[in-house]
């Protein structure tokens, strides 16, 4: 006898509903064991991670701020992944968007440029992100080069370009040679929403992006094409859908969203261009996209949830002296459980009798 | 001439962890599995390898434990990506997050300790040969092991039946399955081999390169290894060239600075990545009808029954 | 009165904070670290100082730290989290936290901040740093004495004034011994990448340097020098364990006295925003024991150290001649003014290289 995985005839709605609960339950059990080993009280540790950040306005704002770039990028990535186009270079597109938008901020610095600066910066960021994402897309469509790998390579190139610019041409003349541009002018800064808080306009943009994603996928022909091309490429071909065109389109959209997220992050919470503006948003967003099951609303929830673990992780360091590494381990475990449980929506386990060689040989 | 010899020696050492990790990933990817968790497996290998060597005083035992740690990490990946058919990209990224956390916890116990690094070989007569001697016979054993490993992998992939089957799984898992090959089991072995190599590559850093453990000491080398497999277009011979080219750019960039040549270092550092993309495009073009990447790379496989 | 006000504000704040398991009688002191506490260098030294602080004043204070806080969008939140957890005095220990610290400081006027190595201050935000260039001057003299090749290898992190002034001080010190001394500089564009630091050390030695000086944080370069039978200077922390035969001395970041002093001031209600740039005289940093050198070199180093400590000697004594041969304007009497050193963006005569990005 052995256990095998097999595809369900159709996705299981029940599992889809209860799988997050199972995953969280498993995580809690694992965490309790982990905390017990570390000699911390599991109940209060769990409260610090999951409950406390939800109980005050400040933490809620910070969760939204942290989730904003993750959600925006992940929405774009989900379109790619649904269309079977594997953009894993969102980190690079994020950085290029930040660089392109910052160019205008640096050039208009100290001039009396009006309120057109910020919208123009956002547009530049989005366009640059889209163009940068089109490089791997074109390489794939035109030459058949694996987009997974070219998009990943371009992350490093973007990172080095940013590094070069802030250490060289764009360096703040008053900044004592530290690798950063000068602080952006107010007209080049994303406004905050609440006095004294960090919640900024970008979070609203992210919500609009979620809504647009939901409409695109649920209500438009293009959205339908994207889903069909990904789920049933043969059917799509018979239906006359142009898969290549969709690769270009989804890459451009996801690049634009990543670039937009990049410039919003730089012109918002950071306020200037410097190395290290992204603590891996582009990669974390891939996880967010899958945690959210490539569904816009799911992504919104997943992004907020992942942000919660970051904020909770900091509070755990402060309140319970739980090392940051434990938070990383905990995030890793949580992701594994969620992904594993979600797998059971499409698949199920079955016990079969052994002698697989004979069996498969016979077919 | 001495400078050239010295540069070559540095390049060999700097390239070794890249070559080791990339060799493992090459086999994994050839079987059709994309494991983006190389960095995570490496850093855990580094922590466990150093810890074991420090406790036991044996480099070999340390390397062994690094390998075991890498395998254990890869088994988590295999359970998810193969056993539960979870998306490989997401799983690999999650594995890296987990690995960074785990290595920090493991490494906390021996912060500030140091060990005697793996000795450089000395074979009387041979190592003393002018110019070539130290390069061919004077590095630490890992350097030569990594080359032997690549040769072994080449032989396995192209000269054995098992290698042929492994490649078949990577190119078309449906056909391979139809022919009666246990696709998932073969992939499991390939993933484990990738983990073992990544663990060894990670362990190389604290055991031979810089003989202490510091959290985050892999500093992105796992990601470069991923780039290398592409650069090499999944061919072992090209992998060697690629690894040494990556290593050479890193080292020469430093030498250029020391010699006062003022090229922006970022420009030189970005060359290997740009080269990788160009190589990928050229190779894909050269072979009409698709890329040289294993066709089933990164796709989920669940056997029909 | 002031103290009572603080306590009231703190209590108020504690009320808003979840859980509220806060002891009103203990001062909460927070730290933000750039690296992991086990990095063996920069963050490690701050952590050691925090531990010393706890040992000294543990009955009156409670400390918390956040480690591995990137100098990006997360820094501001991390600092604010410490404020919200009731910390009244917060040390932010890396240059990149300057703007985030300032932002949070403006928002919480009743909390005091101490930012390490920056130049922006506020009513409730002090800065502190150490005159490491003094130590580098001594190292330069030792290096020139000990180097047979007359070529020093210097591993830089980023070309910021702190590092540039360190290179200049080294050269000025070295030139007092050997006017023809040469230096080769490699920038690794990182504070912390052991592999790359080791590679840089190898490259420098391969190019003919026989002495390694570093302004990066890991002991990797020391290790390489030891392995090659060459000499080196440590950075941040005692690195002799990694090069028992190689380490000549090391600049040790000893933050503990400063931290203890500032926390005592906070406890007494006498904390004021200040700009502290301490040197050998105030023990803001120390020199590790002079090892692996003959007695006469050791004597010279000790004499120089004593002279600098007593204020009789200054590394940037006028005239200072820049690379282009022009004399630098002497704004500080008989030596360069602090501002000139803090913003140093030129190499002194005798360095053939040029500052990257300039």
Image: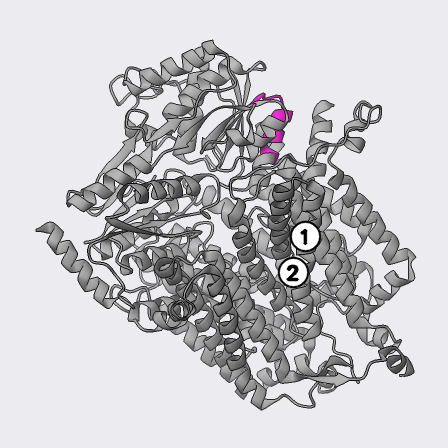
> Is C325 rendered above or below residue C241?
above
In which image quadrant can residue A193 be found?
bottom left
Q: Is residue A203 left or right of residue C338?
A: right
Of the residues under marks 1 and 2, which one precedes in the sequence? Answer: 2
Q: Is residue C204 visible?
A: no
Magenta residue check for B273: no
In which image quadrant can residue C46 be found?
top left
Q: From which residue to which does the magenta span run?
A: C199-211
**Which one is nearer the viewer's eye here, C262 or C197?**
C262
Tags 1 and 2 touching, CB below 8 Å: yes
Q: Is residue A191 left or right of residue B170?
A: left
> Is C97 rendered above or below residue B298?
above
> Is C66 rendered above or below residue C134?
below
The residue beneath circle 1 is B199
Q: At x 42% / y 36%, what residue is drawn?
A: C160
Q: Is residue B238 left or right of residue B277?
A: right
The residue beneath circle 2 is B73
In which image quadrant can residue A130 be found?
bottom right
**Which one is nearer the viewer's eye here, C145 or A99?**
C145
Q: Position of residue A112 (x, y in %)?
A: 29, 54
The chain under label 2 reads B
Q: Secondary structure at mark 2?
A: helix
**Which one is nearer the viewer's eye here, C37 or A30?**
A30
The chain under label 1 reads B
Residue A79: numbered disc? none
Q: Position of residue C25 (x, y in %)?
A: 20, 55
Q: Is residue A15 left or right of residue B68?
A: left
Q: Would you say the magenta stretch is mainly helix, strand or loop?
A: helix
Q: At x 26% / y 66%, what residue is drawn?
A: C20
Q: Secondary structure at mark 1?
A: helix
Q: Position of residue C56 (x, y in %)?
A: 28, 41
């Amino acid at each position: 006898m052995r256990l095998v995985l097999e595809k369900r005839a159709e996705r299981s709605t029940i599992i889809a509903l209860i799988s997050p609960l199972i995953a969280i339950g498993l995580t809690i059990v694992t965490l309790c064991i982990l905390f017990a080993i570390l000699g911390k009280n599991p109940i209060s540790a769990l409260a610090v991670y999951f409950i406390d950040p939800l109980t005050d306005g400040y933490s809620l704002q910070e969760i939204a701020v942290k989730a904003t770039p993750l959600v925006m990028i992940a929405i774009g990535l989900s379109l790619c992944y649904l269309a079977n186009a594997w953009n894993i270079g969102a980190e690079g597109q994020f950085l290029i968007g930040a660089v392109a938008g910052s160019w205008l901020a640096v050039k208009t610095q100290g001039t009396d440029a009006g309120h057109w600066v910020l919208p123009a910066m956002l547009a530049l960021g989005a366009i640059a992100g889209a163009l940068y994402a089109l490089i791997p897309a074109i390489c794939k469509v035109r030459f058949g080069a694996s987009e997974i790998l070219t998009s990943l390579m371009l992350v490093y190139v973007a990172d080095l370009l940013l590094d070069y610019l802030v250490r060289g041409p764009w360096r703040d003349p008053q900044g004592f040679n530290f690798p950063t541009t000068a602080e952006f002018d107010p007209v080049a800064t994303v406004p905050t929403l609440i006095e004294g808080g960090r919640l900024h306009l970008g979070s609203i943009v992210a919500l609009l992006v979620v809504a647009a994603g939901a409409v695109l996928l649920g209500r438009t022909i293009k959205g339908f094409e994207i889903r069909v091309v990904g789920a049933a490429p043969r059917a799509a071909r018979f239906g006359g859908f142009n898969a290549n065109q969709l690769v270009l389109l989804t890459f451009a959209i996801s690049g634009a969203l990543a670039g937009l997220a990049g410039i919003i992050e730089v012109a918002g919470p950071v306020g200037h261009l410097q190395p290290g503006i992204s603590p891996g948003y582009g990669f974390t967003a891939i996880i967010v996209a899958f945690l959210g099951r490539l569904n816009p609303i799911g992504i919104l929830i997943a992004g907020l949830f992942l942000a919660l673990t970051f904020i909770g992780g900091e509070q755990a360091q402060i309140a319970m002296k739980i090392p940051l590494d434990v938070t990383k381990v905990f995030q890793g475990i949580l992701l594994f459980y969620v992904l594993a449980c979600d797998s059971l929506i499409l698949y199920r386990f079955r016990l079969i009798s052994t002698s697989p060689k004979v069996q498969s040989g016979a077919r | 001439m001495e400078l050239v010899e010295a540069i070559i020696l540095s390049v060999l050492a700097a390239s070794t962890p890249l070559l080791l990790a990339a060799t493992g990933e090459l086999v994994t990817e050839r079987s059709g599995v994309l494991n983006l968790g190389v960095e995570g497996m490496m850093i855990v290998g580094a922590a466990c390898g150093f810890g074991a060597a420090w406790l036991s005083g044996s480099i070999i035992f340390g390397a062994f434990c690094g390998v075991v740690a890498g395998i254990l990490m890869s088994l988590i990946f295999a359970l998810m990506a193969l056993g539960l058919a979870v998306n490989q990209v997401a799983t690999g990224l999650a594995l890296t997050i987990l690995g960074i956390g785990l290595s920090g916890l493991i490494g906390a116990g021996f912060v500030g300790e140091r060990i005697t690094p793996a000795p450089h070989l000395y074979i009387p007569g041979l190592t003393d040969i002018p110019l070539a001697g130290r390069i061919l016979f004077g590095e630490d054993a890992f350097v030569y092991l990594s080359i032997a490993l690549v040769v072994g992998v080449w032989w396995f992939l192209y000269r054995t039946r098992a290698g042929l089957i492994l490649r078949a799984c990577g190119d078309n898992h449906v056909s391979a399955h139809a022919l009666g090959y246990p696709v998932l089991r073969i992939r499991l072995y390939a993933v484990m081999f990738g983990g073992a190599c990544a663990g060894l590559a990670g362990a190389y850093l604290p055991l031979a390169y810089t003989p202490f453990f510091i959290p985050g000491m892999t500093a992105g080398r796992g990601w470069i290894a991923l780039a290398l497999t592409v650069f090499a277009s999944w061919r072992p011979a090209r992998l060697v060239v690629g690894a040494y080219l990556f290593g050479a750019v890193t080292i020469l960039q430093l030498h250029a600075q020391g010699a006062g040549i003022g090229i922006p270092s970022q420009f030189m550092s970005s060359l290997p990545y740009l080269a990788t993309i160009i190589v990928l495009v050229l190779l894909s073009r050269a072979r009409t009808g698709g890329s040289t990447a294993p066709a089933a790379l990164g796709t989920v496989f669940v056997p029909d029954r | 009165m002031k103290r009572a006000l603080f306590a009231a504000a703190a209590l108020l704040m504690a009320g808003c904070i979840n859980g509220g398991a806060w002891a009103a009688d203990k001062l909460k002191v927070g730290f933000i670290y750039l690296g992991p506490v086990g990095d063996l260098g920069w963050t490690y030294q701050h952590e050691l100082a925090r531990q010393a602080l706890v040992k000294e004043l543990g009955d009156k204070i409670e400390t918390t730290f956040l480690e591995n806080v990137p100098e990006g969008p997360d820094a501001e939140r991390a600092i604010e989290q410490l404020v919200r957890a009731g910390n009244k005095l917060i040390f932010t220990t890396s240059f990149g936290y300057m703007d985030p610290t300032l932002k949070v400081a403006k928002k919480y006027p009743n909390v005091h901040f101490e930012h390490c190595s920056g130049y922006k201050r506020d009513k409730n935000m002090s800065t502190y740093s150490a005159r490491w260039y003094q130590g580098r001057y001594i190292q330069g003299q030792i290096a020139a004495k000990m180097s047979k090749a007359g070529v020093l290898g210097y591993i830089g992190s980023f070309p910021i004034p702190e590092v540039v002034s360190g290179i200049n001080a080294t050269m000025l010190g070295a030139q007092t011994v050997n006017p023809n001394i040469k230096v080769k500089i490699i920038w690794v564009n990182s504070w912390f990448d052991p592999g790359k630091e080791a590679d840089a050390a190898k490259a420098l030695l391969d190019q003919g340097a026989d002495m390694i000086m570093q302004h990066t944080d890991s002991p990797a370069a020391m290790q390489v020098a030891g392995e090659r039978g060459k000499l080196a200077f440590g950075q941040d922390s005692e690195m002799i364990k990694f090069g028992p035969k190689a380490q000549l001395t090391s600049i040790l970041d000893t933050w503990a006295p400063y931290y203890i002093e500032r926390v005592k001031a906070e406890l007494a209600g006498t904390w004021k925003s200040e700009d502290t740039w301490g040197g050998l005289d105030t023990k803001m940093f120390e020199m590790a024991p002079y090892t692996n050198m003959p007695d006469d070199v050791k004597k010279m180093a000790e004499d120089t150290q004593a002279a600098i400590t007593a204020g009789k000697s200054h590394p940037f004594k006028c005239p200072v001649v820049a690379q282009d041969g022009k004399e630098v304007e002497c704004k500080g009497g008989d030596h360069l003014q602090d501002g000139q050193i803090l913003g140093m963006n030129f190499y002194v005569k005798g360095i053939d290289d040029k500052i990257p990005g300039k």
